[in-house]
Amino acid sequence: DVPVLKPRRLGSVTPVYPAILRERGIEADVVVVVTIGVDGSVTKVELVGPASDPSFNDAALAAARAERYEPATQGGVPVVFTQRFTIRFRLND
């Protein structure tokens, strides 16, 4: 078996913090599963750990869709890769 080398993020997209939630002092975590295609683009985003307010979820999904990667490879050949990560909304960010 040839190991899969994970994709590398080509820069981070900061999600837009919903203004009304920032004003209210509300923070949240949103967990997503992202599928990265052989060209490094995000081909699918799934919400697996939503925040209680849908505005956070919408902002997290939009940011995750906008990310770009150097694709995962296996034996030097680009492959589709799925990964899970948490997008954190913090007032001090």
Image: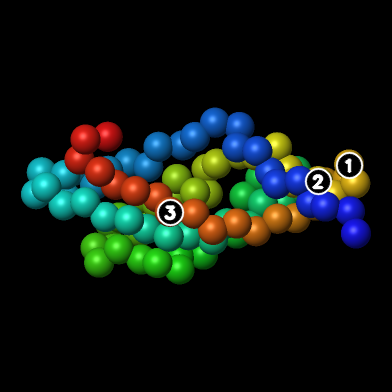
At x 32% / y 56%, what residue is drawn?
29
**Disc 2 to disc 3: CB gap under 8 Å:** no
Q: Which mark is residue 73?
A: 2
- Against 16, is 62 above or below? below
Which kind of residue does numbered mark 1 sit on? Gly
At x 25% / y 66%, what residue is drawn?
52
Instruction: Give x and y (percent) for residue 68.
Output: 61, 39
| Residue of label 1 | 76
Q: Is residue 40 at least partly visible in the picture?
A: no
What secondary structure is marked by label 2? Answer: strand
Q: Residues within 10 Å of mark 3 (few under 14, many from 20)?
A: few
Instruction: Give x and y (percent) for residue 54.
Output: 29, 63
Q: Please give left or right for residue 16 compared with residue 63 in the image.
A: left
Dividing the picture into quadrants, the one containing residue 34 is bottom right
**Disc 1 to disc 2: CB gap under 8 Å:** yes
Q: Please give left or right for residue 70 compared with residue 46 in the image.
A: right
Which kind of residue does numbered mark 2 sit on? Thr
At x 27% / y 34%, what residue is drawn?
93
Q: Furthest-left residue in view?
A: 24
The total of numbered circles placed on residues is: 3
Q: Residues within 10 Å of mark 2 (few under 14, many from 20)?
A: some
Give the mark nearest the N terminus, 2 or 3. 2
Q: Is residue 3 at least partly visible in the picture?
A: yes
Dividing the picture into quadrants, the one containing residue 57 is bottom left
| Residue of label 3 | 86
